[in-house]
Image (cartoon, rainbow, N blue to C red):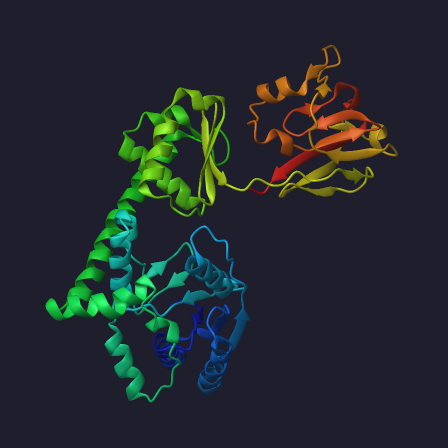
Amino acid sequence: MPARLRVGLSGGLDSTVLLHVLAALRGQLGFELSAVHINHGLISGSAAWAAPCRQLCDGLGVPLLVREVVVRRDHPGGIEMAAREARHAALQEDADGALLVLAHHRDDQAETVLFRALRGAGVRGAGGMRVLDARRAIWRPLLDVPRRDLKAYAEEHALVWVEDPSNQDLRFSRNFLRLEVLPRIEARQIGASAGLARNGRLCAEAAALLDELADLDLASMGSTEARRFSRAAAVSLTPPRLRNALRRALDRAGALMPDEDRLCEAERQLRLDTVAAGWRLVLGTHALCVYRDDWWIELADLPSIPAAVPWDGRMPVLPWARGLVRFDPAVGQGLLAAAVMGACCEVRGRMGGERLRLRPDGPGRSLKNLLQEAAVPAWYRPLLPMLWVDGRLAWVAGVGIAAEFLCPSGEPGVVPGWSATD
């Protein structure tokens, strides 16, 4: 049992029972217990639900944190997914190593498996929820417990809970399955919900095996650099196996999974020789990218190109395009400090027509050609920070330092660099 548990407390039946059970066990098992209640403001009157949560926690001697979140209305996955992501982010904020405990039960699992199966979510989706999600530090200890047992426990202990009126709204597909479809299936075939949940566990096992295979395939592709993989190795796989690897790469990146048609089209285009010149396919929240023999996954939204930023020769860090430009002091490396200190310096993006001489005995060359040689994809080139000193181009990220600004051996220097967070 982890030393610290944090319960996601909505105030409904399920989370109320979960908190009550854990509160009774904490002395015996020796763990710290707290609760967090999230109000996303999407349901009229939901702000009042914090009061019964406080009353319950006060009675049990459990610390409660109440948080309000703002839900994105333009989320690619819709308002429900946006609310779920906002809620989970708030539940895990400042967790400080605590395991998040959620009250999903067997009926929830059956509903999830059926809902995803109807959407054609495949083995991974049909796997439903995991009892323990180690990656996100989430535990669902009630996942094999039917809701009727939770209600019987609540009535036996005279617990009071909040009823969410939106749970009765049949306009929502999940509510329709829960209130109309699953009860009819259960009446026709006793134990159907348990069977769906069991099928979810079996699919989860199969999905885990597919993930292991994908991890082996991604490892065999070899990273030419962090998070990049060999396209030649990728296209040697069979189509189902390559799509499996793509799903895994997207999942690792935290992407919303594209539908089957979109993923098949991505796999087809990835095999085309023409993509080696530079290709970027947006798949919802993320993009699949190829340049030469590398492929990788990145966020779909590229950073905006910042305005020019002045640099006084002393500031060690400047923000730039979801990353940082650093200037580290050195000796005999980087830019000659004497050439930049006291000069008029600024960092700005590419404007076109720039030239750079990288060797003292070499010619000035167009930045376009240098960027091609440096294997910088076309969509990154406008984002690269460039340092200008008294109107002369001194450094370009990913390319190098102009020969006239190179620091000689033994002299004080400044080493520039750009690290993007994406």
Of 96 and 379, nearer the camera is: 379
Whether residue 102 is visible, yes or no, is yes
Residue at figure coordinates x 75%, y 19% from the top left:
403
Please count the marks in the image.
0
Q: Nearer the viewer, residue 16 or 263?
A: 263
Percent x, y of residue 264: 32, 35
* Position in image of residue 136 (x %, y %): 43, 57
The quadrant in which residue 211 appears is top left
Q: Is residue 142 above or below residue 404?
A: below
321 vs 337: above or below: below
| Left or right: 144 in relation to 419 | left
Residue 334 x %, y %: 73, 28
Q: Which quadrant: the N terminus? A: bottom left
Q: Quadrant of the C terminus?
A: top right
Q: Is residue 16 above or below residue 249?
A: below
The furthest residue to the front: 171
Q: Position of residue 101 (x, y in %)?
A: 40, 68
**Rendered residue at 46%/74% (across/down):** 32
User: From this viewpoint, is residue 410 visible?
Assistant: no
At 43% across and 46% down in the image, what residue appears? Answer: 255
